[in-house]
Image (cartoon, rainbow, N blue to C red):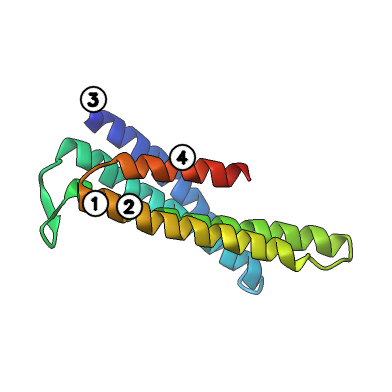
Amino acid sequence: AYGVLSLVTTAILLIICLISFHQLCSTDTDDRQRLRKVLFVVLVNVIGVLLNILIYASYLYPTTLVLFGLNVSNCASIFEALAMIVTFRVLVLFVLSVLDALHERLQITTPPWLKYLLYSLLGVIISMVIVCYTLAWVMSNSFWMHVFHIILGLVILI
């Protein structure tokens, strides 16, 4: 059952990835800002495809060694942590871009405290990813990953 689900979800994510890659290829090269945004979307989609494959592989082949003596589950956890850092960074960039565009239309500058708030949240998330995932890996206990997701939910509610 996991093999079929893996193929279906990976196919869906690959289609989304191809659509975003098409957006990247059809974006005017003179519009650097849009080009950079679409490139970030492609990056997040590629990360999503790879993470999906790793997560399903960790269920299908949990004890298989992949890199440097790490099994598939460990590689999936490490990649998941890196994916969270990258995607939250891209989210902050997009939120700041929307806020800047909104304030530009209103012909006012974006308040600096909004940028500080978003970068502070980004710092909290990155710190929590490093702390919680490191503790989960060192203690071989997924409890710390659950702690991280609870904290992430609280930060997002803010």
Q: Which mark is residue 71?
A: none
What amino acid is at disc 3? Ala
**Left or right: residue 48 compared with residue 122:** left
The CA span between labels 4 and 3 is 29 Å
| Residue identifier under label 2 | 133
Task: Examine the rendered structure and indicate whether residue 15 appears above or below residue 47.
Answer: above
Q: Residue at point 59% right, 63% down? A: 119
Residue 156 in the image: x percent, y percent? 58, 45
| Residue identifier under label 3 | 1
**Left or right: residue 24 compared with residue 135:** right
What amino acid is at disc 1? Trp
What amino acid is at disc 2? Tyr
The CA span between labels 1 and 2 is 6 Å
Residue 137 in the image: x percent, y percent? 24, 51
| Res. 95 in view | yes
**Circle 2 Cα neighbour tier, 10 Å, few/some/many (<14 / 14–19 / ≥20):** many
Q: Secondary structure at mark 1?
A: helix
| Residue identifier under label 4 | 150
The part of the image, by quadrant, that contains residue 90 is bottom right
Sooner in the amino-acid sequence: mark 3 or mark 1: 3
| Residue identifier under label 1 | 137
